[in-house]
Image: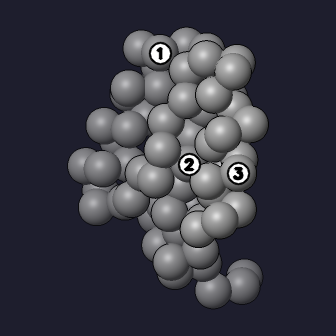
Amino acid sequence: MRELTNRVAAITGAASGMGQALAIGLAREGCHVAIADLNEEGLKETVKTVEGMGGVITSTVTGMQEIACMLNNTIAS
């Protein structure tokens, strides 16, 4: 696998299922993650898990209007 340390990934659907597993897995490999989901409570759990293992969350998004801003900020990172 390619080196992921300090890379940045934008992940939608990160409150549960595959999106959550991807966010946690990438963070475990050293990738910084920007996560989005409309399920605010589930997203908080993902943040708690990622930060609990020393991962870096660059942003969290829970509203449709914030998604474009998150993607622009992630690309700029």
Note whether 16 is above or below 8 in the view shown: above
Residue 46 versus residue 17: which sits nearer the camera? 46
**Quadrant of res 61:** top right
Q: Which residue is mark 2?
A: 34
Q: Earlier in the sequence, mark 1 or mark 3?
A: 1
Q: Secondary structure at mark 1?
A: helix
**x 28%, y 61%: residue:** 54
C-alpha distance separating marks 3 and 2: 11 Å
Alpha carbon separation for disc pair 2 and 1: 14 Å
Examine the image and state in which quarter residue 15 appears: top right
Establish if 42 lies above or below 12.
above
Locate the C terminus by quadrant: bottom right
* Residue at the spot 63% in from the left edge and 57% down from the top edge: 74
Residue type at numbered disc 3: Asn
Residue 59 seen from this side:
yes
Q: Sequence order check: which comes first, mark 3 or mark 2?
A: 2
Say above or below: 50 vs 30.
above
Residue at 42% across, 14% down: 41
> How far across and down, in percent of the image, does residue 12 sit?
70, 35
Image coordinates of residue 18 in percent, x first then y, are 70, 36
Q: Residue 51's mark?
A: none
Q: Which mark is residue 72?
A: 3
Which color scheme is applied?
one colour
Percent of width and height locating residue 51: 30, 50
The reply to whether callout 1 and callout 3 are in contact (CB within 8 Å) is no
Q: What amino acid is found at the position of numbered circle 2 in the picture?
A: Ala
Q: Along the line of sight, which residue is nearer the eye, 17 or 45?
A: 45
Q: Quadrant of the N terminus?
A: bottom right
Given this view, does label 3 or label 2 mark the residue nearer the observer? 3
* Residue under numbered circle 1: 40
**x, y (%) of residue 13?**
68, 29
Mark 2 crowd level (few <14, some 14–19, many ≥20, 10 Å Cα) = many
